[in-house]
Image (cartoon, rainbow, N blue to C red):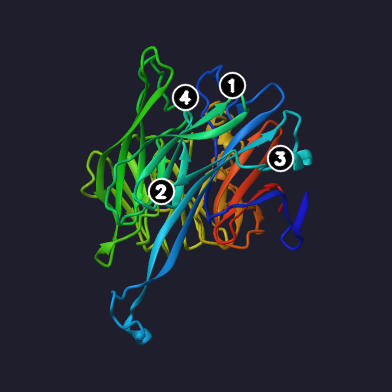
Amino acid sequence: MVDNDSSSRNTWFDTVVTPLNACSLETYTPIRNEPPTEEISDCKIITENENDVVIPLIIGCYQLNEQLTDTTTNGEDKNKDDNDNDISKSSSRSGELRLYMISSSPSTTLSSSTSIKFGSAHDAVQMESGVLDGKWRRRQCKPVIYASACASGRMHLHSLEKNNSQQTWTLSHLTSSDETDGNALCLSLAWNDFVNNTSNDDTNIKSDDQIVSSYSNGTVALHKVATSTITNESQDVVSIEETHRWNAHTMFGCPSEVWTCSFLRGDENVVLSGADDMTLKVWDTRQTQRHIHKIGESEFDAGVTAISSHPSIDHVFAVGSYDEYVRIYDYRKMDQPISKVHVGGGVWRIKWHPSCYHKVVEGDISNSGKMLVAAMHGGCRVVNVPILGGDDGGDVEILSQFTAHESMAYGADWISSNKCEVVSSCSFYDRQAFIWNPNSS
């Protein structure tokens, strides 16, 4: 255990430096079916053997590579004044998915969590372009799928695979979305996998999932992800198909970057989007010519950058903005947020506490309002919203903060198993990822 900065009491257990800029970080927290399946008996972990558990963690990397290019043609005088603009910049975007399997044992506690480390990356997948976002499909069924949003405008789906003979894990490419506008970046994505929204899977045909994605050209799109198993073959066949796309956000008559999007728990036809135009919009996917609700500049002082629907409470979702606030909304009463809290930095990711994926359904509302926030230059915050925990009189509070990052904290997620609960987060320009104690203020 290292106290990296005594003034802010940053307690971290391990750190790793990524080869490219770290843009997103996601751990796998599968949704518990009712009742839990024998295949994955614990809702928070993948069991490796009787003594150890491993938690998959992926860091998505994005790097813009700029090069100076001589634009003069053969035979032309290259000894011209610099103002002639014969030297221009060209750019390319590099991307990578780095897979870590975080190990712990059932006896691991927070006091002994120095044993929880990144270790070496089990796999490093070179991507066609920079990775801006990624999400695990949390439904408790095979294959375990990770979807990534890339600067090329495409999404790529990979499955988590284990090599039993070598005791290693890899990411295997399944499929990719079709190419769209080559100038549009895919900025974010979200699955429609909420607690109790799963269907019983047939032996040969599994029910379809959906992904909503958002783009730098102001559009939002829906995709159907179908997983099926061919009779007499063990290999799953996965496909992704865009079913609908619409123009969602503009600013000063031009397309506005749609930084974030999400499905709404409680209404399968509702999608939420947030953009650089300082608006949050609500869409009915059956009729997208016009939004059904909009919250704009009267509430937000900067672009809307993060939306996260509560995994197990209908109609509730969290919204983050460059204006450094996290706001909690109830879809049934959108005139004002239920609550909001200033987190000291522009909000880029919001992750609900892992217990939100199952305890609320089972009647345990503890931690139902607890969330992790990646707050860019402000580092990371652990926030609690008491109203979601049954205490209507409580105030929103920041439980802890982590400011060891020397750059923009863009990615963060919980690592939770048995008696041990830690957090991992990553920052962009310094390419660092940490595992740290969320209970240290």
Of tags 1 and 2, the one toward the viewer is: 2
Residue at the image position 68 percent from the left and 48 percent from the top: 436
Q: Which residue is mark 1?
A: 41
Q: Which residue is mark 2?
A: 128
When the figure is inspected, residue 85 is found, relative to residue 121, above or below; the finding is: below
Q: Amino acid at mark 3?
A: Ile
Secondary element at image label 1: loop
What crowding class fits label 2: few (fewer than 14 Cα within 10 Å), some (14-19), or many (20 or more)? some
Q: CA distance from mark 4 to mark 3?
A: 27 Å
Secondary element at image label 3: loop
User: Looking at the image, which is closer to me, 373 or 426?
Assistant: 426
What crowding class fits label 4: few (fewer than 14 Cα within 10 Å), some (14-19), or many (20 or more)? some
Q: Earlier in the sequence, mark 1 or mark 2?
A: 1
Q: Which residue is mark 3?
A: 116
Q: CA distance from mark 3 to mark 2?
A: 32 Å
Relative image position of residue 427 (x, y in whole percent): 57, 56
Q: Amino acid at mark 2?
A: Glu
Residue at the image position 57 percent from the left and 63 percent from the top: 377
Q: Determine whether, in the image, residue 325 is placed left or right of residue 287.
A: right
Q: Is label 1 in contact with label 2 (beta carbons under 8 Å)?
A: no
Q: Hey, which quadrant is residue 406 in on the image?
A: bottom right
Q: Determine whether, in the image, residue 245 is placed left or right of residue 110.
A: left
Q: Earlier in the sequence, mark 4 or mark 3?
A: 3
Residue at the image position 60 percent from the left and 23 percent from the top: 164
Q: Which residue is mark 4?
A: 142
Q: Earlier in the sequence, mark 2 or mark 4?
A: 2
Q: Earlier in the sequence, mark 4 or mark 1?
A: 1
Q: Is label 3 in contact with label 1 (beta carbons under 8 Å)?
A: no
